[in-house]
Amino acid sequence: MLTIPLNLLQSTQTPHSGYHWDGSSRRFFEGWYYRVTLPEIGQTFAFMYSIEDPIGGKPHSGGAAQILGPDDEYLCRTFPDVNKFWGSRDVLGLGHWGKTDLQISPIYLLPGEFEHHVQEGYQATATLNQGIIRDRASNNYCRWQYEIQPVYGWGNKNSIQQSTAGWVSFLQIFEPGWQILMAHGLASGKIDWNGKIYEFTNAPAYGEKNWGGAFPQKWFWINCNCFEGEPDLALTAGGGRRGVLWWMESVAMIGLHYQGKFYEFVPWNSQVDWEIQPWGRWQMKATNSNYEIELTGTTDLPGTPLRAPTEDGLRYCCKDTMQGKLNLELREVSERKSKIILKAESFLCGLEVGGGSWDNFWQSR
């Protein structure tokens, strides 16, 4: 049985932490993203889990685990049997079994039991990420197990945590939904990447998810919680064209956690502007009645193509690097004056573009 301490739930569990599928046969996907960054060696591991049409028997029914590893190397394993997937409706908890000697319905296992009985698959909660996958063609593999101590959910510390998309995210109006589950945490454990062992203690960790029955036409994403000389700083920003009932809209947001405080720039409280190149440069600026923020993300790396759920199933439709450069400036504004609160930079920023129509840069206005 999956149990999480009550004080942890009260302090960091966000809305939408549970599995969203309602049991219906409508087109549906849910995806989860876990990441751990190793600043000492300048590398990152990102784990992406997904399930599509979990009712089964549909053209795109099935799940997958993808990993973006050292130097943006890529590993993927699909899990076609939806009956080997499990997800908790009440708390963050999910897993998918591939090869196993167990003859039971999938459930959360103690880490030692999972390692013994599950030869391919994964399980993840708010405080654990564990699994093993292998590419059968190349025989490349990854085995991972680390514990997570959440620091920031999505909101002010020791306050009720917020929906990333606001209260309307509880309604089936905006699709897909998006929720940052853990803006910042500390991870300790071990990752075996093709025989090379990476051990870490209190490494920066992050988690988010998305879900729904519709898919964004186009999107971008900037994420970093590993800054030079600023251990208590976490940023997530992004935008996209998404469905709202019967029309499409372009929206973007920036969220920053710094020294226990949450700075939120969203369409209902801020002016958010962006200019995103097809690849290589991400620029955003947002202003509200109290603060303004500017971000510039850049990379000279080519990026790694990743799969994402689409109308046509899991497809290569986005490109990422976890080694982007980011410059950030946060200012307090009042009476036409501005005071710099924070200037920070990172060389381990996650940068992504996805979807179609990236022939030219994308500007908010």
Image (cartoon, helix red, strand yellow):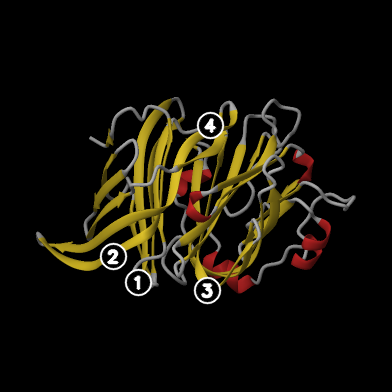
* Camera-nearest residue between 211 and 103: 103
Q: Which mark is residue 230?
A: 1
**Residue 47 picture location, percent across and down:** 58, 52
Earlier-in-chain disc, 1 versus 2: 1
Proximity of marks 3 and 4: CB atoms separated by less than 8 Å? no
Q: Which residue is mark 4?
A: 214
Q: Nearer the viewer, residue 67 or 15?
A: 67
Q: Residues within 10 Å of mark 3 (few under 14, many from 20)?
A: some
Q: Position of residue 121 (x, y in %)?
A: 73, 51
Which of disc 1 and disc 4 is earlier in sequence?
A: 4
Q: Residue at x 37, y 56 (%)?
A: 255
Disc on the earlier residue, 3 or 1: 3
In the shown orientation, is residue 259 left or right of residue 317?
A: left
**C-alpha span from label 4 to label 1:** 37 Å
- At label 1, the amino acid type is Glu
**What kind of residue is marked 2?**
Ala
Q: Earlier in the sequence, mark 3 or mark 4?
A: 3
Q: Amino acid at mark 3?
A: Asn
Q: Is residue 15 visible?
A: no
Asked if the residue at tag 2 contacts the one at tag 1, i.e. Cβ–Cβ closer than 8 Å, the answer is: yes
- Spatial separation of the CA atoms under disc 1 and disc 2: 7 Å
Considering the numbered disc 2 on the image, is that residue within a helix, a strand or a loop?
A: strand
Q: How many residues crowd around disc 1 within 10 Å: few (fewer than 14), some, or many (20 or more)?
A: some
Residue 58 visible in the current orientation: yes
Which mark, residue 95?
A: none
Residue at the disc numbered 2 = 344
Looking at the rendered structure, the secondary structure element under dot 4 is loop
Mark 3 lies on a secondary structure that is strand
Quick check: 78 above or below 222?
Answer: above
- Mark 4 nearby-residue class (10 Å; few <14, some 14–19, many ≥20): some
**Sequence-wise first label, 2 or 4:** 4
Which three-letter amino acid code belongs to the residue tagged 4?
Answer: Ala
